[in-house]
Image: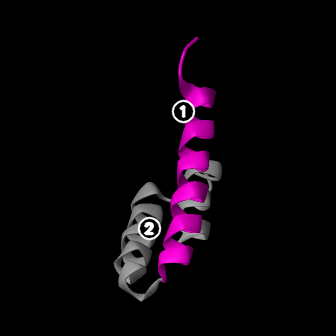
Amino acid sequence: IIASVTSYFMRPRQRPTKQIIATVQYNLEQLEDLSPEELEVLKATTDGLIDAHMRKVKPQ
């Protein structure tokens, strides 16, 4: 899941957007299989990636 989110934000021009989004959606369906600890790590990592990307694209 983290790899999918990372690829979406870090490599958006290298693969078609629809393919990246489909991969993220597929992987998010796997959330039921994660433990609470794994979900916390996923949330922290995803929040950090999104925040970093927003700082990068948001005008100052």
x then y, percent, for residue 9? 57, 49
| Viewer-side label of 1, 2 | 1
Q: Is residue 48 above or below residue 8?
A: above
On the image, which quarter does residue 21 sit in?
A: bottom left
Choose between 31 and 13: the one closer to the eye. Answer: 31
Q: Residue furthest front?
A: 36
Q: Amino acid at mark 1?
A: Met
Question: For the C terminus, which image quadrant?
Answer: top right
Dominant SS in magenta: helix
In the rendered picture of this protein, how many numbered marks are placed on residues?
2
Q: Amino acid at mark 2?
A: Val
Q: CA distance from mark 1 to mark 2?
A: 18 Å
x then y, percent, for residue 34? 47, 83
Does the segment drawn in magenta span residue 55? Answer: yes
Q: Is residue 40 above or below residue 51?
A: below
Q: Residue furthest bottom?
A: 33
What stretch of residues is rendered in magenta? 35-60
> Residue at point 53% right, 22% down?
58
Tag 1 near tag 2, CB within 8 Å: no
> Residue at point 63% right, 38% down?
52
x then y, percent, for residue 56? 63, 29
Where does label 1 land, which residue? 54
Where does label 2 land, which residue? 24
Q: Is residue 48 above or below residue 24?
A: above
Choose between 23 and 19: the one closer to the eye. Answer: 23
Q: Residue furthest top?
A: 60
> Helix or strand or loop: what does disc 2 sit on?
helix
> Helix or strand or loop: what does disc 1 sit on?
helix
